[in-house]
Amino acid sequence: MVPIDRLARSDQPAAVATLAAAFAQYPLLAALCPDAARRPRLVEVFSRYLFRMSVRCGGAYATPDRSAVACGWPPGREWPSRWTSLRHGGVSVLWQLGRRAARWMSQLEHEFDVARVAHVPGPHWYVPMLGVRPEARGKGLSRAALRPVFEAADGAGVPIYLETMTEANVAIYQKLGFELRGYRELTGGLPNWEFVREPRRDQSPRSCTASV
């Protein structure tokens, strides 16, 4: 079994590098920043923001070599406030987006939230980002990085929610035990597939094995 570490702010450079590599061509970021020369900076800032938000609530995990990183927000912290978001890097994201794209992103965030409430209205884990370096894919590292989230959610008896704009990810998430619950076109014509993993009832609350 691949060991998994819980990450801290000191792990930011390696973790963000992996997330940025994994999301370099993500449809959302490509749409928000059509300029290919500027996009890498937005991808980096966006990845750093979600990583910091996850570290703040103890939900950032990775393989020892940091080639796979999972960002999770646990029950009670799955709906961060606007102030919390800004404090952990949201200002930098808005700056990189510019006024027009920031307005679009604000509308998309509202649509993401509407979808999430519809599928998981109660306490849940939310996975805003799961990334594996391109050269490390196909080795089961996504499942490994998510293992602490699975175990924590199963122990608490709560579902896990995530979404993707990449159709190729649909089969991957289904293999990981997520159920496709919805699909919608967001503002601007962006596709969004919405997934829920229900808790496994045979898990123990004490079964989380992530190292710290």
Image: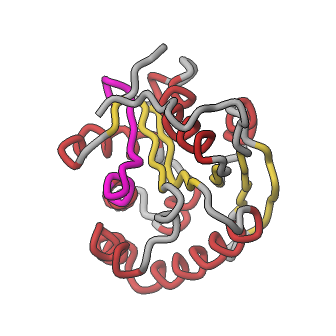
Q: Is residue 116 visible?
A: yes
Could you tell me if residue 43 is visible in this image? Answer: no
Residue at x-position 51% and y-position 25%: 141
**Residue at the limit of the structure toward the top, as seen here:** 1
Q: Is residue 31 above or below residue 101?
A: above
Q: Nearer the viewer, residue 31 or 145?
A: 145
- Tell me the quarter of the image containing the C terminus: top left
Q: Is residue 47 above or below residue 77?
A: above
Name the residue rendered at 47%, 39% in the picture.
131
Residue 210's spot in the image, x, y percent?
40, 30
Residue 72, percent from left and from top: 48, 50
- Please say whether residue 53 is one of the residues in the magenta stretch: yes
Start and end of the magenta stretch? 52-66
**Residue at coordinates 63% horizontally, 73% vertically from top-left?**
113
State the residue in front, 82 or 106.
82
- Name the image quarter holding residue 41: bottom left
